[in-house]
Image: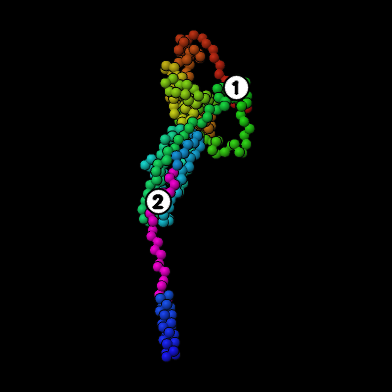
Amino acid sequence: MRLQRLTNILCFLMFSLTLAGCGAGSSQPAPTVVSAAAPSITAQPANQTVTAGQTATFSVTVAGTTPFSYQWRQGTTAITGATSASYTTAATTTAESGFQYSVAVSNAIATVTSNAATLTVNAAAPATTDVLTYHNDVARTGQNLTESTLTTSNVNSSTFGKLGFYAVDGLVDAEPLYASNVAVPSNGAHNVLIVPTEHDSVYVLDADSGAAIWQVSMLKTGETTSVSYTHLDVYKRQLLAVGVPARSIEASPLCTSCRTDLLFSYRAEKGRTGRMMGVVGIRG
């Protein structure tokens, strides 16, 4: 009897172990399913403030399923070549202050557009030394005694270089002058450039934006610019034909008949005798 009971207990234990083993063998982890996600902007482009002549950089951070494609816009206009997570402008001018920049980010699922970031461009600080006469002073030394020592650390692309191209009506005939913080009637204070041209015009330009504040012609009644002197154009063509560079040819807008206050004209002055002398030479 005891032997039968022991045999029954052993059979029960073996049956329990068999069930446990079967159960353990059939339990498998559920597979992980990864779903593609649309772009989500986690860091929006930030507003930027720079000084005229400097560049500005806008950037965006995105989460979601890669790869992403980017297209930056200025206002509603797509910027050619601006197709990465950041965009750096060209050298700025004060005319660009207030421009807004945003970026559209796309992947295979969707496209999202960032908030617009605003660019603020401040005018450059006034120069420490105005240029108010040819070569800086009446002695024509060309010295700028307030200039700091220039080194490779303070001469760089963000502070030195071409600031802009300002349009006038002809070649610049003399050294442009610079005056800072000039009060212009009914137009506020400006840093200005004073520029004379070969057509006897004088411009006052905003030195930071290039906008013309005013322009005046120095020609008197009856005078015209040199380009209208057709007989002189014949001489100019002859000089060009023999190889004289155009930049080395200058035709004066003055005529003897129009400016008898400066020159003698037998015709205009009714035959009264006068004397004048002209000297032509090459300065070595």
**Secondary structure beneath disc 1?**
loop
The answer to which of marks 1 and 2 sits earlier in the sequence is 2
Label 2 is placed on what type of residue? Ser
Q: Position of residue 251 (x, y in %)?
A: 49, 24
Write down the region rendered in magenta. 25-45
List x then y, in percent, for residue 221. 42, 16
Residue with the most extreme front position: 1
The residue under label 1 is 137
Instruction: Say above or below: 83 vs 7.
Output: above
Residue at image position (44%, 44%) is 45
Mark 2, other Cα within 10 Å: few <14 / some 14–19 / many ≥20: some
Dot 1: within a 10 Å radius of its alpha carbon, few (fewer than 14), some, or many (20 or more) residues? few
Question: Disc 1 vs disc 2: which is toward the camera?
Answer: 2
Q: Is residue 251 among the parts visible in the rendering?
A: no
Q: Residue at x 62, y 31 (%)?
A: 148
Q: Nearer the viewer, residue 199 or 41?
A: 41
How many numbered circles are shown?
2
- Residue at image x 41%, y 64%? 32
Residue labelled with disc 2: 40
Q: Position of residue 182 (x, y in %)?
A: 49, 22
Q: Quadrant of the N terminus?
A: bottom left
Q: Give whichever of 85, 77 is nearer the camera.
A: 85
**Disc 2 on helix, strand or loop?**
strand
Q: Is residue 181 magenta?
A: no
- Structure colour scheme: rainbow
Seen at 44% across and 47% down, the residue is 43
Mark 1 residue type: Asp
Between 161 and 96, the one lying in front of the other is 96
